[in-house]
């Protein structure tokens, strides 16, 4: 079989039926990356963009695509000013060193930030190309916070921590956009995980092309249309060296979903594309045109109350709450929801166990962790 584009001998086989030569495959992959950015029109010329690097397959390819784009001299030049950042913890210092070396090959500087700075209200920008020292009490507090949660909740909460830090450092670097390296495979897994942990209303931002929850910084997924299968061919052709590392805990629900999707994709090639198309449709349905409402303190998701009848889940939560003694009921309601004011109006959604400053997903994580383990700046926002 020959390349479907130019007729040359094929070297790449995608989805067991599409044949490409190396040159046509590279052109196609670059086009997907540039088209994803161009058709959505969210970037201004020469805009500062912070690019999050994890060292994995998608991150390595994104780094190479950005370098190729900004190196062009013609009208197809990628007109952005890139800044790079890597978030690490004590378990992957070797990975951080590898990413510094990886960026230096392209003559790029990279900021390396420890995840434990989330525990501090002052996140200062470190020197580029070096691993910063972090106070031991912060690393211990960060580790204790995650260890106080079940694996599934900890994996979900870690994603929110990373998002918060990316937005914070983007503002310090005066970047209005952040690039992250989610692929179609990653987004399919995140889509199912979001539904499982109660973040279905956040699909537009978590799975869609652009996360616009922050007023000043947009998080963009420029390789969302590229699959892991394509990335592996790209890495082989370009002779790149990704460092494989996963934040998903082995005993978590997310790891089960990841294994399920990967296994299904191996037998049914349309699995991931079907899941992603479904996610896009749900995201479009949930899009509220960025109307500003109160935001979740942790993930910045919309906290708007929807006019709906009492659901079975809400009725169960209400029944559980009213089974407590009256003083405990009153204190719980006052601390966790503006419920008492709306008690007589059954048309309003009633979630007495959800904190009034948190979305449903973050409320679940919050209920499963040690409250004293939260950073002080978050505790203050929650009025703890």
Image: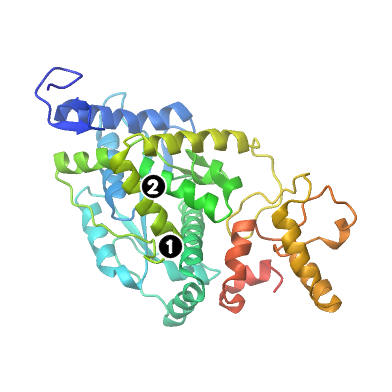
Between disc 2 and disc 1, whose residue precedes? 1
Count every numbered label the image shows and give the total: 2
Vertically, is 131 above or below 105?
A: below
Give 313 or 353, whichever is nearer the viewer.
Answer: 313
Vertically, is 15 above or below 300?
A: above
* Residue occupying image coordinates x 48% and y 64%: 152
Report, in whole angstroms, how far the alpha carbon at label 2 lies from the one at label 1: 29 Å
Q: Quadrant of the N terminus?
A: top left
Give 35 or 113, whichever is nearer the viewer.
Answer: 35
Vertically, is 73 above or below 204?
A: above
* Residue occupying image coordinates x 69% and y 56%: 313
Where residue 164 sits: x, y (%)? 51, 58
* Residue occupying image coordinates x 45% and y 71%: 116
Which label was assigned to residue 186?
2
How packed is label 2: few (under 14 Cα within 10 Å), some, or many (20 or more)?
Answer: some
Q: Quadrant of the C terminus?
A: bottom right
Identify the element where label 1 is drawn.
loop
Identify the element where label 2 is drawn.
helix
Residue 5, quarter of picture: top left
Give 86 or 182, whichever is nearer the viewer.
Answer: 182
* Residue 36 visible (yes or no): yes
Q: Nearer the viewer, mark 2 or mark 1?
A: 2
Q: Is residue 218 left or right of residue 21?
A: right
Residue topped by disc 1: 125
Q: Is residue 354 left or right of residue 84?
A: right
Where residue 25 sits: x, y (%)? 21, 29
Vertically, is 333 above or below 18?
A: below
Where residue 375 sits: x, y (%)? 57, 72
* Residue occupying image coordinates x 64% and y 39%: 290
């Amino acid at each position: 079989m020959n390349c479907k584009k130019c007729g040359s001998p094929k070297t790449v086989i995608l989805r067991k039926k599409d044949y490409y030569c190396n040159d046509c495959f590279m052109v196609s992959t670059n086009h997907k990356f540039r088209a994803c950015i161009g058709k959505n029109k969210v970037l201004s010329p020469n805009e500062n963009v912070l690019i999050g690097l994890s060292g994995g397959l998608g991150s390595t390819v994104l780094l190479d695509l950005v370098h190729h784009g900004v190196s062009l001299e013609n009208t197809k030049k990628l007109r952005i000013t890139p800044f790079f950042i890597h978030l690490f913890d004590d378990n992957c210092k070797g990975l951080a060193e590898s990413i510094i070396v990886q960026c230096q090959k392209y003559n790029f500087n990279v900021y390396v930030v420890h995840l434990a700075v989330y525990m501090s209200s002052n996140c200062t920008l470190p020197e580029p190309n070096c691993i910063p020292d972090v106070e031991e009490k912060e690393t211990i507090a960060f580790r204790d916070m995650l260890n106080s949660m079940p694996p599934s909740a900890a994996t979900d909460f870690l994603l929110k921590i990373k998002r918060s830090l990316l937005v914070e450092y983007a503002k310090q670097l005066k970047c209005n956009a952040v690039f992250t390296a989610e692929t179609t495979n990653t987004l399919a897994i995140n889509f199912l995980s979001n539904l499982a942990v109660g973040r279905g209303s956040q699909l537009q931002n978590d799975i869609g092309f652009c996360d616009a929850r922050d007023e000043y910084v947009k998080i963009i997924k420029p390789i969302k249309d590229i699959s892991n299968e394509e990335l592996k061919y790209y890495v082989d052709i370009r002779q790149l060296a990704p460092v494989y590392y996963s934040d998903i805990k082995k005993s978590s629900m997310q790891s089960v979903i990841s294994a399920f999707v990967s296994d299904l994709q191996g037998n049914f090639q349309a699995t991931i594309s079907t899941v992603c198309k479904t996610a896009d449709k749900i995201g479009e349905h949930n899009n509220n045109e960025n109307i500003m409402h109160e935001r979740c303190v942790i993930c910045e998701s919309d906290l708007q109350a929807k006019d709906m009848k009492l659901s079975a889940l809400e009725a169960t939560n209400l029944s559980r709450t009213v089974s407590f003694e009256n003083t405990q009921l009153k204190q719980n309601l006052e601390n966790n929801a503006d419920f008492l004011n709306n008690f007589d109006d059954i048309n309003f959604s009633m979630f007495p166990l959800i904190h009034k400053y948190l979305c449903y997903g973050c409320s679940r994580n919050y209920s499963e962790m040690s409250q004293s383990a939260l950073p002080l700046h978050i505790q203050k926002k929650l009025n703890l």
